[in-house]
Amino acid sequence: MASPALQATTTIAHLTNAMLRSPSSALACVRGVSTLTRAKLPNLTRSLCTSGSRPNFLQAAGPNKKSCRAPGAIRHLSASSTSTPRPFASVAAGHAPANPPKWRPPTEECLEERPVLIIGAGNMGRRLALVWASASRPVTVYDTSQDALDATTEYLTDNLGAYCAGRGTHPGHVCTTTDLRIATTTGRLEGTQSATEAQDIELNSGAKGPWMAVDCLPESLGLKAAVLSQMEHLLPGSCILASNSCSLQTREIAAAGRLHHPERLLNTHYFIPPRNRMVELMSSSRTHAEIFPFLAAQMQRVGLAPIIVPVQSQGLIFNRIWAACKRETLAVLAEGVARPADIDALFRDFFHAEKGPCERMDEVGLDRVASVEKHCLEERPALARDGKAPLDWLVRSYVDRGSLGEKTGDGFFTSAERDALKEKHKVEHYKVVEEARGA
């Protein structure tokens, strides 16, 4: 029979996979695990690791598996070839220290060995994997969907080399996996054996786990709170927890997920990298101050341009301004003042922009636009007087009818109208944003 600690780690991995598939039950799952942990399993591990040989992998960049250490290698690690994870002692859940230890940045040597963990292999996740792997640094991409990981591998194979060539850098190796145990530890290279007990201790200590984990999950408070709460336990104690949320503040996520160490958590809001280089960094209200200059410097090294938001702000900076534009666009449409095509034509002409607000909202998905706007009005009640009627119109006229934009075919524009706009953009020599099929 499996030990209580092993049962705990297996349960955590299983539930976290379930959370990614079922956002609506995410918070219930994490609370259930927390209760189990407090009642029966006080030595819940913060990190898991594999023993024995390195799991087999598929080399996407070439047939030679042994070349995985070379820059730019892309590999997939599966759960089937891993051995039993061995837990190690950690802080018991529900007993966070009143005065958390001072955070210290990882050394240069650690950064060369410890990966950046990307949680979610969607459009944003694969783009962040490309950027963070562009300076000879290792990256791990975790998702429960093998199809999403395959699309990530295709995207990186098509774009990582060219992006590095343009910057004069060398690509690092990228690991994709559906196994949470592999995602939260670095593990061993294929074929290597445990040479000494000291190596085992070092491996099991979590010292070589990710130095940063970036949440690229859908914009759901329950999902993000549940997954980040579990990652807090599974990852090394020094690991930075970053959320790419554009509308949820990490202080909300920390409260909803009952995180014990919000001092490791912050917002890192990317846009559409690598085309857009800007990143907004904002505290959870308790983030270690030392994290900001360190993380900003690391972002600059991979070609990003960070901006630190000095105070708590719903929507951070750009999305708060963009939200006002979307809100007025919806009001103009709801009142019958203009058609989507008219609004976008005016916007493109005045700002010399590639696309207008209606086309942008169709791309994002009108259901997501409605969800973000609803959350914004709840957080900022003063906006509800003028913002509620346009939101209700959007939900009634489009979302409830299943007309969600590009993802369903029709939205503010029909599929045919969007195709015509894309041809117009090509004629006008606008750069194509999606660098690879499925990006």
Image (cartoon, rainbow, N blue to C red):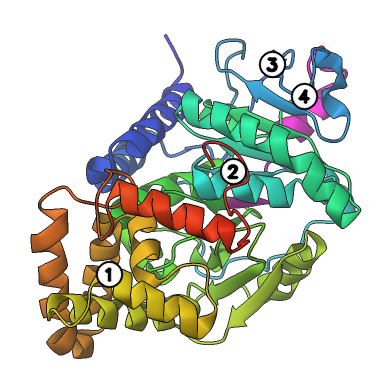
The residue tagged 2 is 126
The residue tagged 3 is 58
Q: Give me the C-alpha separation between circle 1 and circle 4.
A: 44 Å
- The numbered mark at residue 340 is 1
Measured as percent of width and height from the top left, residue 307 is found at 64, 78
Determine contact: label 2, label 1, CB under 8 Å.
Answer: no
Label 1 neighbour load within 10 Å: few <14, some 14-19, many 20+: some
Measured as percent of width and height from the top left, residue 227 is found at 41, 46
Can you tell which quarter of the image residue 290 is in?
Answer: bottom right
Residue at 87% from the left image edge and 48% from the top image edge: 165
Which image quadrant: the C terminus? Answer: top right
Sequence order check, earlier mark of 1 and 4: 4
User: Residue 40 versus residue 36: which sits nearer the camera?
Assistant: 36
Numbered disc 4: secondary structure:
loop
The residue tagged 4 is 61
The disc labelled 3 sits on which kind of residue? Leu
Can you tell which quarter of the image residue 175 is in?
Answer: top right
